[in-house]
Image: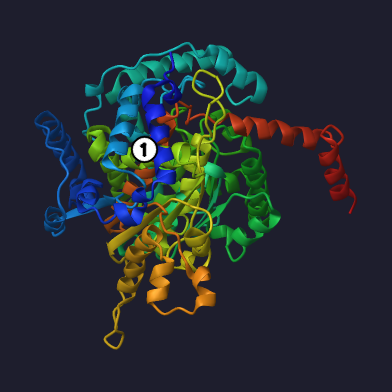
Amino acid sequence: MTVKCTDVPQYDALEAAAASFRIDDKLHLRNLCNDSTRCNGLIAFHHTSEYSSNNSDQHHQQQQQQQQQQQQNGQYQQRDNANILADMNNRRMIHLDYSRQQVTGEVMELLYDLADAVHFQSRREGMRRGARINSTENRAVLHHVLRMPKGYDFSIYGKPSYSDGNALHSYHHEQHQYYNDNMQQQQQQQQQDSRDESDGNRLLQKVHRVQDRIETFTDQIRSGEIRGVTGKRLKNYVCIGIGGSQLGAEFVKEAFRGDPAANKASQGRVLRFLANVDPIHFHLVTRNLDPEETLVVVISKTFTTAETMLNARTVRKWLISSLGRPSIKEPDIISKHMVAVSCNMDLCKKFGIAEQNVFGLWDWVGGRFSVCSAVGLVPLALQFGFDIMREFLAGAHDMDEHFFDAPLRDNIPVILGLLGVWNSTFLGYGTRAILPYAQALKRFPAHVQQVDMESNGKRVALDGTPLLHESGEILFGEPGTTGQHSFFQLLHQGRVVPADFIGFIQSQQPVDFADEPVANHDELMSNFFAQPDALAYGKTLVDLIQEGVPEPLREHMVFAGNRPSSSILMTKLDVFAVGQLLALYEHRAAVQGKYASIECCCWFPFFFLLIFCNQNQQDSSGGSTASINLVWNWENI
């Protein structure tokens, strides 16, 4: 039986608390933020000892033992700022300050009680051990397994439970042909997957075998051992995919560009992403690329995604027309210049891609959670090398362990998810801004937008009954300080938009000139620290009178304040930290979905859109009057 958040008494208590925040001026943030006891209680942190990728496996085994010991001894506790600063010399840190959120200690306790009432912790544990928590598709949700290092003991988390999903598999097969035509083969594969999932270490070995293949292949490409059909080294990589097959890997690529080690490893190479079917995107991606030096990675879990396959056929024709000659045949061009990431081996081979050039993944890897699978590893390892990707996986795994092990009150993804529930469901704020004060994270808001809005933008609860509240938030964002000159006017004086500020103590590329009074990174971080306070405190009419502002301008310069935000401060934005951020926001989205009792890992809305697109492709007269008029004008102008 699904326990909905609206069915438990904590929901009513939180609604009453939210009503108080709307009318009681004592609960304005300018008052709450002057309460030092409250503020010190609204801080959480996570720290990780420094280590290199060369000893990451040994480190994770030690960390696993330490975390189990900490749980037994109850050692997860909040610490004051002095202790946090003392750790910074030898540890990387994530410091969450949510004292500028419209919450009190009592509200947070109600949210933690709500977690208990909806059985959040048991569902989190179900995810960890491989239970099929994606009930609509009868699948486990195991993207955290993709980040587990060799030597990690996954067997300790027990065996998952299963439900019969044949009806759902049949639905997918009949409506969209997303699975093999042979239903018996599907059922046999499902039984094999069940056996693998029931033995965590066996499943983990399969993951590592795929990673080993990716490492070997990408090393051979980078070293020149494998070359193009004309003998030239392959140093340009075109990644064809859309949604989860593009946004996550593109965000990581942009974040890595500013890291000195990753940037050095990518010298002389070009990685571009082709997602949009707009022909100009193909032109922009392929222009200035030498086809003889280009390797194409086609990413589609089913190898049927319409946009991806159209772009794949377009790029295939580009390769053939550019490289084809009497001595070079089409199959040779495809075998040397195209690889795939997919579950559908038959369609990959039919397309012309050799079996040895197909890198697989599993149905328990959701598209928007697939960056750490072959979806992200193949293109990113081609560009940066697998040693860099190993460090990235280690960072994501570190955050996975924090999410699964840390108690709720010290758990950063859980706290952020709770605040999302509070702001969107109870306070009625329907938007959230992602504001990374790091230019390298310019594509991070777009990735989080997909992870969160596709996961939590649902109409019904797990049991199929309509939700009694709106779900999810509208996400947007830009890096600071450019965003301040774009939409911060609205944040300060227009709609109330809760915000996540993300900053870093150390710069990826420090710039400090003796003739400048302030270093570039210090200027950036002064804005990072000032904006949350300005949003919280605002500026009153009394303040403006005391400052001598002319009377005609005073009302225009009043800032109401009381605008909630969280500040996430990390030690540095390196490859490891990018992995941490990825996993942090994946888990944050899952937390919010679990509280709302919705299925945040399925993707049925895509099917809905696909049906409409197919109807318009097959018969322009079969749509609505509006769509018929649009199509007619498009075809005849």
In the rendered image, the residue lying farthest to the bottom is 515
Label count reads: 1
Q: 269 or 282, which is in the foreground?
A: 282
Camera sees residue 149? no
Tag 1 residue:
418
Relative to 130, is 273 above or below? below
Q: What is the image's colouring?
A: rainbow
Q: Residue 10's image quarter?
A: top left
Q: Position of residue 326 (x, y in %)?
A: 68, 52
- As drawn, 453 above or below 206: below
- Where is residue 242 shown, x and y percent of the image? 57, 44
Judge whether residue 630 can be spotted in this image.
yes
Where's the N terminus, which quadrant? top left
Amino acid at dot 1: Leu
> Which one is nearer the viewer's eye here, 94 or 296?
94
Classify 337 as above or below 523: above
Q: For the point 67% across and 49% down, which residue is it?
A: 277
Q: Nearer the viewer, residue 324 or 55?
A: 55
- Categorize mark 1 by other alpha carbons within 10 Å: few (<14), some (14-19), many (20+): many
Q: Residue at x 31, y 49 (%)?
A: 98
Question: Residue 119's spot in the image, x, y percent?
Answer: 34, 22
The answer to which image quadrant residue 588 occupies is top left
Q: Position of residue 413 (x, y in %)?
A: 33, 40
Measuring 41% from the left and 27% from the top, which residue is drawn there?
A: 12
Q: Residue furthest left?
A: 73
Quadrant (top left/top right/bottom left/bottom right) for the C terminus: bottom right
Describe the element under mark 1 as helix, strand or loop: helix
